[in-house]
Amino acid sequence: MARQMDYQTIREVFRRFHESEPEPKGELDHVNAYTLVVAVALSAQATDAGVNKATKGLFAVADSPEKMLELGEDALIAHIKTIGLFRQKAKNVIKLSRILVDEYGGQVPNSRAALQSLPGVGRKTANVVLNMWWHYPAQAVDTHIFRVGNRTGLAPGKDVVAVERAIEDNVPVDYALHAHHWLILHGRYICTARKPKCGACIINDLCPFEEKTQ
């Protein structure tokens, strides 16, 4: 775990991220808050590309909790059977759809606690939805962000909550909204787990990682 980066260095890191990609976007396809919740819930232990392929047909026929309940669990499974853990995920999607209809008038709530009360929705999923749909600077820490945060010293922490707090505490507020997207994309495509592409990294000179590659 690297030491916490100082403010000026963090600011320069995110200035470069912003210059490279001013408006980073999440890679999960969705059409409204409900389909975003479902897509993120389905994405656990699955790739965004795989989820998008499965949900293209699903969201064409079920883009609301009411329509998902009408579709039913068996038909839902048929749409998402290419995704890992599809049976449990289908159960969760049906359950959360029922709760949204019965307790929230069919609308997706926009507090972290309410979102986390839904089956299959953890803190990371809740933060993704708060960030991407309501543009709240919530920091959804996945394995990519955990790795980048600790390797670089941008947001070191022993667990995902500690890294989330480090991002919230140390990233300048004018970069906070997009911080988790920049970090996810950096971890997914450049600062990869086994062989990071340090030669192509735009923050190489600012990063203290000792085992850099060419």
Image (cartoon, rainbow, N blue to C red):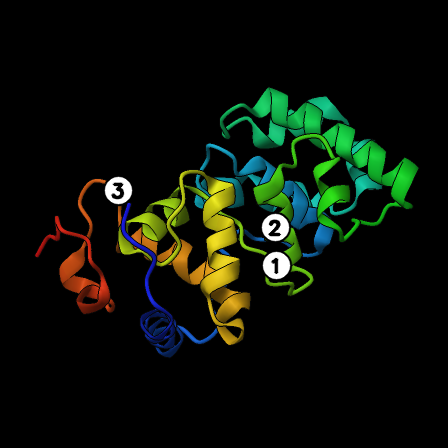
Residue holding disc 2: 127
Nearest the camera: 149 or 185?
A: 149
What's under tag 2, amino acid-wise?
Asn
Task: Residue 12: name its quadrant.
Answer: bottom left
Give yes or no for contact between labels 2 and 1 (Cβ–Cβ under 8 Å). Answer: yes
Considering only vertical position in the picture, is 201 above or below 69?
Answer: below
User: What residue is at 59 percent from the left and 46 percent from the top?
Assistant: 56
> Mark 3 or 1 closer to N-term?
1
User: What residue is at 70 percent from the left and 39 percent from the top?
Assistant: 116
What's under tag 3, amino acid-wise?
Ala
> Please, what secondary structure does the residue beneath circle 2 have?
helix
Q: Position of residue 211 (x, y in %)?
A: 12, 48
Give yes or no for contact between labels 3 and 2 (Cβ–Cβ under 8 Å). Answer: no
Residue holding disc 3: 193
> Mark 3 or 2 closer to N-term?
2
Considering only vertical position in the picture, is 157 above or below 26?
Answer: above
What's under tag 1, amino acid-wise?
Asn
The answer to whether one can see residue 57 in this image is no
Q: Tell me, for residue 131, which label it has, or none.
A: 1
